[in-house]
Image (spheres, grey):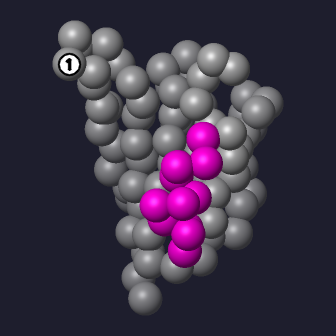
Amino acid sequence: PPRMGYRGFSTIPFLAPQVKGEDMTKPLDAAPNWSITGSLAAFVFLPEREQELEWVRSRYPGGTYRWFYASDGKRLFLLYELRNSP
């Protein structure tokens, strides 16, 4: 708190119950070794953890990323999407 997380913000699981999500409370200090299944994986980074994107991209290359902004121009979050072949 006061930052938003997946489990701490119950609207996300309610709106997308088929989605598996996890909160990463500790910063990454190496490339993760998560098992990715399904045709789409989405990783959401808060601005203060933007540097962790490089760890994820090194392990799961080929995705695209973009920033989302508030109406006042403040960065809200960074989304990295990885589409897998079926």
Looking at the image, the residue that sits furthest to the bottom is 86
Where residue 76 appears, x then y in whole percent?
A: 39, 24
Residue 71 is situated, as x and y percent measured from the top left of the image, at 20, 19
Provide the residue designation for mark 1.
71
Q: Is residue 70 left or right of residue 6?
A: left
Which residue is more in the foreground, 34 or 23? Answer: 23
The quarter in which the C terminus is drawn is bottom left
Magenta segment: does it hold 71? no
* Residue 72, quarter of picture: top left
- Give the residue type at disc 1: Ser
Q: The N terminus lies in which quarter of the figure?
A: top right
Query: Tag count in the figure?
Result: 1
Q: What stretch is highlighted in magenta?
A: 9-19
Residue 74: horizontal and vertical position, in percent?
A: 31, 13
Indicate the quadrant where residue 30 lies. Answer: top right
Q: Would you place residue 71 above or below residue 53 in this image?
A: above
Q: Relative to 72, say whether 18 is above or below.
A: below
